[in-house]
Amino acid sequence: MFGSKILNYREEILKDLARLVAVPSVKGTAMEGMPYGKESARALNLMLDTAARMGFAVKNVDHYAGHAQYGTGDELAAVAAHVDVVPAGEGWETDPFVLTRKGNLYFGRGTADDKGAAVVALYCLKALKDAGIRGKRRLRVIFGAGEETGMDDLEHYFAQEEIPAMGFTPDAEYGICNREKGIERISIRSRDAESGIVRQFSAGVALNAVPDRAEAVVDCSGTKAGALRKAAETAEGTFAFEQTLGGVRIRSNGKAAHAMRPQEGFNAASALIRLLASVFSPAELGPFFTFLDRFIGFSHDGSALGIACSDGESGPLTLNLGLVQSSGGFAEAGIDLRYPVTRKGGPIFEAVRREAEEAGLSAELLSDDKPLYLPADSPLIRMLQDSYAGVTGKPAQLYATGGGTYARAMRGNAVAFGPFFPDEPDRRLHNANEHIDIDRFLLHAQICLEAMYRMLTA
């Protein structure tokens, strides 16, 4: 297997990974020519400068993304990884921006998602060049700088650059993710000033996450405040109360989870709205919160909205109430829908819009990322399966996800492939103490090189 040649670059890979981890490439304030701020731009430039020193042709596309390229030919293959990261957050046992070894583990923000895979992909390109491999097509490693904040980086990149004929992104798990659900983001707003008893309401930090906290300020009598406290004793959720002038402040605690698996969390916003609905009438609560309780509530499948659906390829539709904000008479909610690969997003949104308008609200489709589905018998799938089996001796299973990866940006010509293995423990990708296991990391590196070798030469 050609893939084993990447092991010759182990120490160089770790040195360059340490350099990349040291750049805190969290999205910052946009600057001229730097849409994600200076640190994301610095991380992108670091990778492109490294690639240029290796002798590759490189291009920076407006600091949204860039690439290193090897080989000649009319057709293009690509591997896409990203160099931006989520904020470090609290709870680290090491400096998150210093690559730190503890036994077999290497800690640092981005080691697992996705800086480690980005550095490996570049060294795979170097291994092919050093070996003098001449292929049938050009091969690029594409580095994105804004994956964690919406993935518009590759949208901008591919508006100027050609779409690869084949490719993969090492930003998921093995085997091969050949099915990614469609993703719709929808805003529900009150048309008129809300005049119910809710003076303020806030929940959520992102559409693609289950809110773990929510807070409401309610205008009500002492009797109604007492009824809320009583109802909270048996209601789903955990609540804390604080008396205010003219009412009560209520805090709701839940459990965060990714929107692609909302059933793994507990929605603090839904719990708080349900508590309010158990005490106040729809007239008191107002049309906005009444709608959220009736048509969303604790449901994860959209059944109350009439949009529940499923298929054998990717499973059921999921729904997440990710954001709720209400203040000064204005109210808005954001929902995240992940729909099956064999369905279309248009009719799903229209069903939501109809229900919202009948309730006196408005609905806006913020985005609709179409599903990705590559059949099991496609040449790319077979090539990646052979690469995985050649290195590991095991078959690469196909699977579906409700998440979204860079594979979507390559217009149906790519899939998510690696870098992690299904039996690995919690990798803490977005949490404190993010890390990689060096043995598994190098196994991925061999698979990645084998797959890139086959894309270049097959």
Image (cartoon, rainbow, N blue to C red):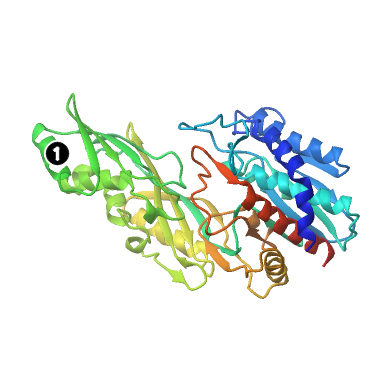
Q: Quadrant of the C terminus?
A: bottom right
Which residue is rendered at x = 13% and y = 35% of the image?
225
Q: For numbered disc 1, what is the local secondary structure?
A: helix
Q: Looking at the image, is 371 positioned above or below residue 278?
A: below
Q: Position of residue 290 (x, y in %)?
A: 26, 49
Q: Quadrant of the N terminus?
A: bottom right
Which residue is rendered at x = 59% and y = 33% of the image?
26
Which residue is rendered at x = 27% and y = 55% of the image?
294
Residue 83: name its quadrant.
top right
Q: Position of residue 167 (x, y in %)?
A: 72, 59
Which residue lies most toward the front here?
Answer: 103
Q: Looking at the image, is 250 positioned above or below residue 448?
A: above
Q: Looking at the image, is 167 positioned above or below residue 46?
A: below
Amino acid type at circle 1 is Arg
- Which residue is more in the foreground, 245 or 7? 7
Report how many numbered discs are placed on residues in the image.
Answer: 1
Residue 150: name its quadrant.
top right
Q: Looking at the image, is 207 positioned above or below residue 74?
A: above
Residue on which disc 1 sits: 229
Q: Position of residue 135 (x, y in %)?
A: 88, 61
Q: Is residue 193 visible?
A: no
Which residue lies most toward the top here?
Answer: 245
Which residue lies most toward the left here?
Answer: 223
Q: Is residue 110 visible?
A: yes
Which residue is rendered at x = 30% and y = 54% of the image?
298
